[in-house]
Image: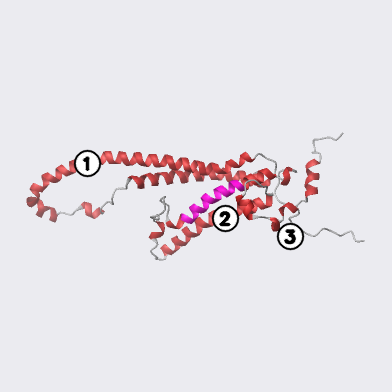
Amino acid sequence: MSSHHMAEPIDHHRPWIRDERDDPARMDWLQTLFNPFGMTSKLHFSRAWTFMFMGRILLFIVPVFSVSIASMAGADLGAAWKPLGFFPLPIPALLVPFFVFTIVTALTSWVAHMRRLADANRSTLKAMIVLIPLILGLVGFAGGVMMGVTGYEAQKAQSAPAAVEKKEEGSAAADAAPVTEAKAEAKPKPAQARGRRGPQPTMKQMALGGGMGLATLLWALAGLPVMLWTLLHVARLPNGGVGPLRTGSDLTQEEQRKLSTAPKPYQTTA
């Protein structure tokens, strides 16, 4: 009998996958992303996380890059950077899909982490870590709105005396207008040369602008350490909680079990 008899690979296109629990054909995307009460193997989790991460990257880079290139080529795409009137937040039109996808995947990422930690026999409470960027973003938005409102009120308080003074000067100048009209026409108008200033932003514009600015900053700063925790810890937890923390699925369940029970170099056996 030949001694070269070996079990059929789990996936002929991915021969390095040897743990049956990581079989790509067995992955249920709906369960992985939307059911927090199940379990997900390490490879299925990594596929789901990669989909969510790459989706965010592409929905941000592709629209911004495309519009920037088209604008440099002469296309008038200024409307793409303007917030949509019906959208509740001042987000540029071309980034609305990115914003919606990010909010949705923050929740599906929490579900996927819950399932992965449950499969690895770890506390599922740790899955709350992936919600920290979203929570900080919401807190930052609230704080930024308050700062924007405060700034608007301070700006309004400063402009009120100036408006009264300007009105008084306008009344006095109205009497002398016939005398100075000819001189005024002869002199250059520095205000017109510099261009007129646009209208002052409203309270809503300042509040939402401040909120989005602070929310984006906090979300981005918190997102990096969370991403590293996911890649270096959660995605490397062993299936079933048996075996060492490692990357890949190139060991069978039996090999993983033997590796987990083998004595360490510093251990002695009875």
Q: State the separation of the CA atoms marked 1 and 3.
A: 76 Å
In the rendered structure, which disc, 1 or 3, sits on the residue that comes first in sequence? Answer: 3
Which residue corresponds to mark 3? Answer: 11
> Label 3 neighbourhood size at 10 Å, few (<14), some (14-19), many (20+)?
some
Which sits earlier in the primary sequence, circle 2 or circle 3? 3
Regarding mark 3 in the picture, which secondary structure is present there?
loop
Where does residue 244 sit, x and y in percent of width and height? 73, 43
SS at circle 1:
helix
Looking at numbered disc 2 in the image, what kind of residue is underneath it?
Answer: Met
**Circle nearer the N terminus (1, 2):** 2
Where residue 51 appears, as percent x and y from the top left, is: 60, 55
Q: Check residue 54 in the rendering and tell me which mark sits there, or answer none.
A: 2
Q: Residue at x 58, y 41 (%)?
A: 129
- Count neighbours of disc 2 (C-alpha within 10 A) and say few if under 14, some if 14 to 19, many if 20 or more: few
Q: Which amino acid type is shown beneath numbered disc 1? A: Ala
Residue at the disc numbered 1: 162
Compared across the picture, whether 181 is left or right of 139 comes to left
Q: Secondary structure at mark 2?
A: helix
Main secondary structure type of the part rendered in magenta? helix
- Figure colour scheme: secondary structure
**Given the image, on which type of amino acid does mark 3 rest?**
Asp
Quick one: which residue is furthest to the right in this view? Answer: 1
Q: Which residues are magenta?
A: 96-111
Are discs 2 and 3 less than 8 Å apart at CB? no
**Residue visible at 24% across and 40% down in the picture:** 160
* 3D distance between C-alphas at marks 2 and 3: 24 Å
Position of residue 109 measured from the top left corner of the image (x, y, whole percent): 59, 48
Q: Is residue 148 left or right of residue 198?
A: right
Residue 173: image location, x then y, percent: 11, 46
> Relative to 204, is 98 on the left or the right?
right
Q: Nearer the viewer, mark 2 or mark 3?
A: 3
Q: How many marks?
A: 3
